[in-house]
Amino acid sequence: MLKIGITGGIGSGKTTVCKIFEVLGIPVFYADSQAKALMTTDPILMAGVREAFGKHSYRADGSLDNQHIAGIVFNDDEQLARLNALVHPAVFRAFDVWVAAVDRRAPYILKEAALLFESGSYRMCDRNVLVTAPLELRIGRVMERDGASRDAVLQRIARQFDDETKEKMADYLITNQEDAALIPQVMRLHRQFTEPGS
Ligand code: ATP
């Protein structure tokens, strides 16, 4: 099964683009929401988190204490890398399980991940798509969507590769600025992925 990775900086619109692919019947694995869920469902990951960040990582009811974890990894790249080193393999395992169960009639599947290139998971995809949008537009979209401050958005952006770096690593680009219609761009890629020999 053809595996397509899809990424983009925060607020670029990658989830919006994936929703269009879903309308075309393409199964999408959302790595970031999976990662969140795995924090409380994957026993290997949970054991790793407890070992690395202490038993207070989880509350008595089994829920994740986000504040505890955020307090440790916030502004500490080493601790953040430690957390990522636990989470990324768990997401890889979940992706493999998901791929094994996906409808074989699907012509290809998508893996959406904010840190597709940064985590190295792009190497496990046959092709990779980058969604781009101007920085100011992205900041405005996320401030509006999440009610976040400009500084908070900029901090999240600083943790991601910049678009210039990602463009070099991507096979295809989708431009999601106001004057660029998304649907024709998605349809063009969909045709490329479904045509034999593409
Ligand atoms: P994140 O990395 O934070 O998950 P994302 O790249 O997945 O972000 P989306 O959630 O798809 O981005 O889009 C960010 C916000 O911008 C959403 O509220 C979405 O509805 C809006 N948006 C995305 N693309 C467009 C567009 N072409 N026109 C108008 N609004 C858009």
Image (tube, rainbow, N blue to C red):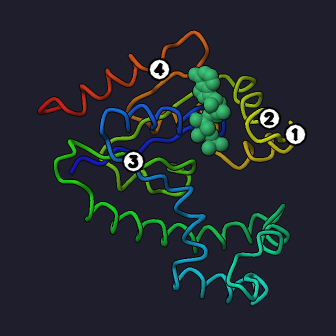
N-term-proximal mark, 1 vs 3? 3
Mark 4 vs ligand 1: CB below 8 Å: yes
Q: Which mark is residue 182?
A: 4
Q: Give left or right: position of 173 versus 80.
A: left
Secondary element at tag 2: helix
The answer to whether marks 2 and 1 mark residues whose Cβ atoms lie closer than 8 Å is: yes
Quadrant of ligand 1: it is: top right
Hey, which residue is sitting farthest left in the picture? 196
Cα–Cα span, label 1 and label 3: 30 Å
Secondary element at tag 4: helix
Hey, which residue is sitting farthest front in the picture? 61
Say which residue label 2 marks. Answer: 143
Give amino acid for label 1: Ser
Cα–Cα span, label 2 and label 1: 6 Å
Horizontal and vertical percent position of residue 13: 57, 32
Secondary element at tag 3: strand
Q: Which mark is residue 149?
A: 1
Horizontal and vertical percent position of residue 170: 43, 36
Work out whether residue 108 or residue 115 is closer to the camera in this orientation and state it.
108
Cα–Cα span, label 4 and label 2: 22 Å
Say which residue label 3 marks. Answer: 28
Give amino acid for label 3: Val
